[in-house]
Image (cartoon, rainbow, N blue to C red):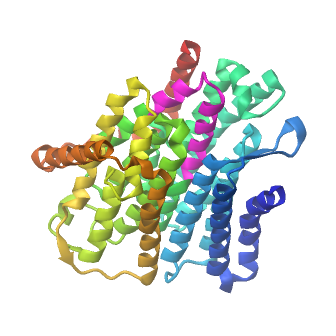
Amino acid sequence: MTNITIGWIALPFFLGFVIYLFPKLDKFLALFGAFVSLGYGLKVFAENSPLKLQLLDHFGVILVVDQLTGYFILTNALVTVAVILYCWQSDKTTFFYAQAIILHGSVNAAFACSDLISLYVALEVSGIAAFLLIAYPRTDRSIWVGLSYLFVGNTAMLFYLVGAVLVYKANHSFDFAGLGGAPPEALALIFLGLLVKGGIFVSGLWLPLTHSESETPVSALLSGVVVKAGVLPLVRCALAVDEIDPIVRMFGVGTALLGVSYAVFEKDTKRMLAFHTVSQLGFILAAPSVGGFYALTHGLVKSALFLIAGALPSRNFKELQHQPVNTAIWVALVMASFSISGFPLLSGFGAKVLTTKNLLPWQTIAMNVAALGTAISFAKFIFLPRGGQAKVTQGFWAAVILLIGGLFLANIVYYEAYTVANIIKPLATIALGWLAYFLIFRRTVLKLPRLFEQFEHLIGGMSLILILLFWMRFAV
């Protein structure tokens, strides 16, 4: 298993190089790399035997592959396969597929890394690959959005690197477990970097612009898997160090409420989905012990929603209310919206039930409010008129069927959720959300300010979050 793991991490980078040597095979090589990850993820679940590799003594590299990692690996594999299928009949160049598989590999590496320096390298590589995909159209707008994403991420990772050095100074190791005995400033600096890369709380307000303005397949990759490269380390830290768990949970609650507060008022489809990415990441952090299953469910459904949103006749909800959506596309949109709202028969239901059962008492009310906000937000999609015309490729349907099919199959992970009591609550929440949508939010014209999404305010916000992290670490 050790050699297989090392080969699995190295393969996407090798394929990214080989694609340039054999450009006519670019799609096939990229798809092959994603399928290898899918097979490896399934193998992790089948064997259910955690693997920890320490390759360079106490200097790192430390790799951990367990069931938690497996959920994230499967998410990355399925979303990457779907995006490649979506782009199959497009005019995407060899460069696009090479960067997509390199991004896939670097995110896999970030999922497996359990030491601070290896994680730093993996996150930086994924950031560069993501920037190149964001800027792929080479328009002025895409290049600015990409550069903004790159600068914000790199600034945050400088703080992270300083924190990693302080952890090593205190423990002579870069292992995540060393955070428990590290000085408060080390934890604050490292968490700042991870919060920004993961799109968490105020530090994640770069996310709506980046994800909404990127091309449709890139938005699916970013929201489906890339941000989770910063989230999984936070989950691991919470599970490894008891003192960190309440901090991660507090950021989870704050993130869930912040994202959904913007989403319920948003009039742009892609921005609404982007804000909901922020909110759903909060659900992963709110219950770290079961965050893997929620990450898998969210990755599949959010990627499907971004791909479907790209096939709608408009991005504006008001315009969509007067432009009927193709019936087949509407059905796919409704199924994905049901899943993220927690409707039974789709894995979003089991993920929400499992998360709810692992919340602490002080989290319950806030997370229920976030769940209600989710139902309100996705009522905008569910009640769109249908019957219009649309022309989409076979690749689109292959990708959407794969992702939505995954939502049905993932139900087996937590089939115990299907009890009468568990079913009644989400159905009541969804019904209440739809009622609130029709009575209040459908006619609301409130537009929340975008001031805090501007580049200079994003950088300034890092300082405020750093102060908050210092205070929280001392308080704990």
Is residue 211 shown left or right of residue 238?
A: left
Image point 19% across, 42% down: which residue? 446
Q: Is residue 467 visible?
A: yes
Q: Can you give x and y, in whole percent of width and height, for residue 164 in the image?
A: 73, 32
Which corner quadrant holds the N terminus? bottom right
Residue 142 position within the rendered picture, expressed as x and y whole percent measured from the top left: 48, 61
Q: Residue 261: name its quadrant.
A: top left
Q: In the rendered image of this protein, does residue 152 appear above or below residue 409?
A: above
Picture residue at 20% right of the left edge, 78% below the top:
388
The span picked out in magenta is 226-252
**Closest to the observer: 268 or 116?**
116
In the image, taking residue 358 as reference, residue 321 lies left or right, namely left
Q: Which residue occupies the extreme bottom position in the image?
A: 24
360, 395: nearer the viewer? 360
Viewer-nearest residue: 371 or 446: 371
For the point 76% across and 40% down, which residue is it?
Answer: 117
Quadrant housing the C terminus: top right
Residue 430 vs residue 437, the one in the foreground: 430
Q: Residue at x 36, y 68 (%)?
A: 308
Report the number of numbered marks: 0
Furthest toward the left, the residue is 439
Predominant SS along the magenta part: helix
- Pinpoint residue 122: horizontal percent, then vertical percent: 70, 50
Q: In the image, is residue 173 above or below residue 84?
A: above
Q: Residue furthest top?
A: 475
Magenta stretch: includes residue 232: yes
> Percent from the top left, x then y, of residue 236?
63, 37
| Residue 223 at least partly seen | no
Queried whether the magenta region covers residue 300, the answer comes back as: no
124 relative to 320, above or below: above
